[in-house]
Image: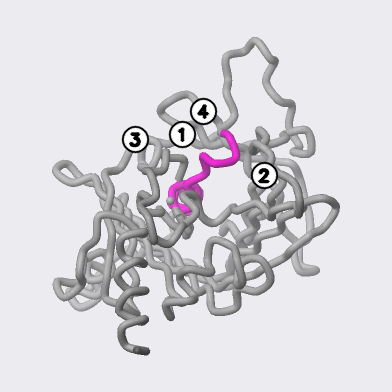
């Protein structure tokens, strides 16, 4: 199994995701390839093929069927990259809030909320997702279950892209481990185009806001629609529709890029995007979890 751009999913939770999974080795924990947009299983039925996101509910006209525009399939959302592109357009350096996952399956809705942090620096992205509160499908049998079982509650994703290095790292601070992968052009925020269309006044948490329809354009020609609520020039809520799931990110605090940066602050910012030398690297998440599982079993014997 290859590693997860977090989402984050990031994440995969990347939270990063949309890469084919390698064959799972015997006795190796199964880890969902794409986070954090899993589908709930329907008892007695095979998992349906992920559907193309519906754009009919978004406040702009979808392209004609013969226009050549392709919408990213449900497995293709790298949440880290999408958020970074929208927030960097607003010239933000950090933002803190929550990721809300709403998944509908067979008429049932499961809702989970997770604390989320994102840091931006010269095309680099760091996201942190706290999965301590994962419940229901997510906590018991879903994509977060293997991490929770090994005592992992923080998923950290680093996207580092410059002239000589294009890498994504998934860090697990509680276990001082990481996995890495090469970045595809679609995973690099600086290569995404952002189109914006104002919708009009709206409210967010009973406060005045401006609602926008935004479209992320990827280097391979794919498009990803998003709804964005802006208050005082800062994106406070961003929503994506992914198949039968809805991802909503709400930011309670946000900090703009500083006009001037002290030496101490520059060092602090740089450390956020450094790979700790004491961390142990693994080829992928499955290998890491297998090692942790074997170590845990050995300890209990």
Q: Earlier in the sequence, mark 2 or mark 1?
A: 2
Query: What separation in Å lies between label 3 and label 1 (alpha carbons)?
Result: 12 Å
Q: Is residue 230 visible?
A: no
- The residue drawn where x is 39% and y is 50% is 24
Residue identifier under label 2: 47
Magenta: predominant secondary structure element? Answer: helix
Residue 285: where, in percent of width, then height? 35, 59
The quarter holding residue 125 reads bottom left
The numbered dot on residue 80 is: none
Disc 2 versus disc 1: nearer the observer: 2
The numbered dot on residue 222 is: 4
Query: What separation in Å lies between label 3 and label 4 (alpha carbons)?
Result: 12 Å
Q: Which residues are magenta?
A: 73-89
Query: What separation in Å lies between label 2 and label 4 (alpha carbons)?
Result: 25 Å
Q: Is residue 28 magenta?
A: no
In the picture provided, is 240 more to the left or to the right than 1?
right
The numbered dot on residue 193 is: 1
């Amino acid at each position: 199994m290859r590693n997860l751009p977090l989402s984050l999913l990031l994440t995969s939770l990347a939270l990063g995701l949309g890469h084919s999974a390698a064959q799972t080795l015997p006795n190796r924990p199964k880890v969902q390839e794409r986070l954090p947009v899993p589908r709930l299983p329907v008892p007695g039925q095979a998992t349906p093929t992920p559907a193309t996101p519906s754009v009919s509910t978004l406040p702009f006209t979808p392209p004609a069927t013969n226009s050549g525009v392709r919408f990213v399939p449900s497995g293709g959302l790298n949440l880290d990259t999408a958020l970074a592109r929208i927030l960097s357009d607003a010239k933000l350096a950090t933002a803190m809030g929550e990721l809300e996952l709403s998944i509908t399956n067979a008429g049932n809705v499961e809702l989970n909320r997770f604390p989320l942090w994102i840091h931006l620096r010269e095309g680099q992205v760091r996201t942190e997702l706290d999965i301590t509160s994962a419940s229901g499908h997510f906590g018991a049998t879903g994509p977060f279950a293997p991490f929770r079982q090994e005592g992992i509650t923080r998923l950290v994703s680093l996207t580092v892209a410059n002239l000589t290095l294009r890498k994504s790292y998934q860090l697990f601070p509680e276990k001082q481990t990481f996995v890495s992968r090469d970045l595809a052009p679609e995973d690099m925020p600086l290569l995404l185009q952002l189109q914006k269309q104002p919708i009009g006044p709206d409210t967010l948490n009973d406060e005045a806001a401006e609602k926008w329809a935004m479209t992320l354009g990827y280097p391979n020609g794919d498009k990803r629609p998003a709804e964005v609520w802006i208050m005082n020039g800062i994106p406070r809520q961003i929503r994506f529709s992914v198949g039968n799931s809805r991802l909503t990110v709400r930011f309670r605090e946000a900090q703009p890029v500083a006009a001037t940066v002290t030496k101490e602050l520059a060092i602090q910012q740089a450390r956020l995007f450094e790979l700790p030398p004491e961390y142990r690297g693994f080829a992928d998440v499955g290998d890491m979890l297998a090692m942790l599982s074997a170590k845990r079993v050995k300890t209990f014997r």
